[in-house]
Amino acid sequence: MTGLTSVGILGTGSQVPDNVVTNFDLEKRLDTSDEWIRSRTGIVARRIAADNEATSDLAIGAARAALDDANVSADEVDLLIVATCTPDRLMPATAVIVQAALGATKAAAFDLNAACSGFAYALDIATQALRGGAYRRALVIGAEVMSRTVNWNDRAVCVLFGDAAGAVVLGPVEKGGVLSSYLGADGAGANLLYIPAGGYREPNTPATLEANRNCMIMNGREVYRFAVQVMGEAVIKALSQCGLTPDNISLFVPHQANIRIIESAAKRLALPFDKVFINLDKYGNTSAASIPLALDEAVRAGRIHAGDIVVTVGFGAGLTWGANVIEWTAKGSSV
């Protein structure tokens, strides 16, 4: 197979748990309030996975919806990437569990962990793989059960996160598609947002569990400062790679972490807020699932049309960041 000129999104899908936990629910067990959470973050509710739900379950549901939307069968998928920092197990990859459930027997499958930037990274990697000609169809999934990474007595962190999955199917298109991506990382900030124990440097023990070292630690002030700086910069650099400017943006789909960060990015890009897609209020921060979940909801809400320039951007632990510029393609435009 020869190299491809254009790789586009052929279909989108998502899945969220049924269990809704509102700010008012959290008021009953934490020293917090709906007004405090809403005014500082923009979050009103989040979805929390049931005890018997794992990342792979949400990923499978989102993947099936995306395949249906793209009119692509599982056995047509050559490459399957699950972006997640909450895998079912340390080994094997969650992607192979998803592959088996879907029946995508021809697909190479692996996980990618760039935390909240994971989908931006995975989308770029899959696009480059398809452009190179080794693969024709890719399934890129962002899926997380972030509720299992937090200490539910830590009111500064636990109110922020929720569980979800979103997916896209990529394939060759006549024109448009993923135009550019800009990815970055700064490992000097690794200790600003991390989980101390549970890996092989510090395996979990009764002592680490007692001290909640298996839960997320976040320097909120520094992560906020980093995010405000990097969001707009990443978008501008991604746009410049394909000869565009913020004026060309039809819809801005940012990582849904904090409404103030999103507002700051929109201001930096001089974007009117009606060009910004927000679903943060319903789901909170769902990490790598955030952008593909928002993309799917934007499509189903009629906010994205063929020919639109859609820009996504994420930031997260690592510290990592990534932006993608997509010229949306019409249904049935796959070649």
Image (cartoon, grey):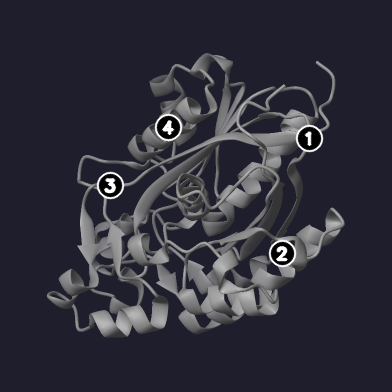
State how far apart marks 2 and 3 are (Cα). Answer: 31 Å
Residue occupied by mark 4: 65
**Which numbered disc, 2 or 1, marks the residue that appears first in the sequence?**
1
Residue occupied by mark 3: 17
* Residue 215 in sight here: no
**Which numbered disc, 3 or 1, marks the residue that appears first in the sequence?**
3
Whether pointer 2 and pointer 1 mark residues with C-beta atoms closer than 8 Å, the reply is no
Image location (x, y in percent) of residue 319:
61, 66
**Which numbered disc, 4 or 2, marks the residue that appears first in the sequence?**
4
Assess disc 3: are there few (<14), some (14-19) or many (≥20) residues with their C-alpha within 10 Å of its C-alpha: some
Residue occupied by mark 2: 235
Position of 53 with respect to 286 (left or right) is: left
SS at circle 1: loop
Assess disc 2: are there few (<14), some (14-19) or many (≥20) residues with their C-alpha within 10 Å of its C-alpha: many
Quadrant position of the C terminus in the picture: top right
The type of residue carrying mark 2 is: Val
State how far apart marks 2 and 1 are (Cα). Answer: 22 Å
Quadrant position of the N terminus in the picture: top right
The type of residue carrying mark 4 is: Ala
Residue occupied by mark 1: 175
**Which numbered disc, 2 or 3, marks the residue that appears first in the sequence?**
3
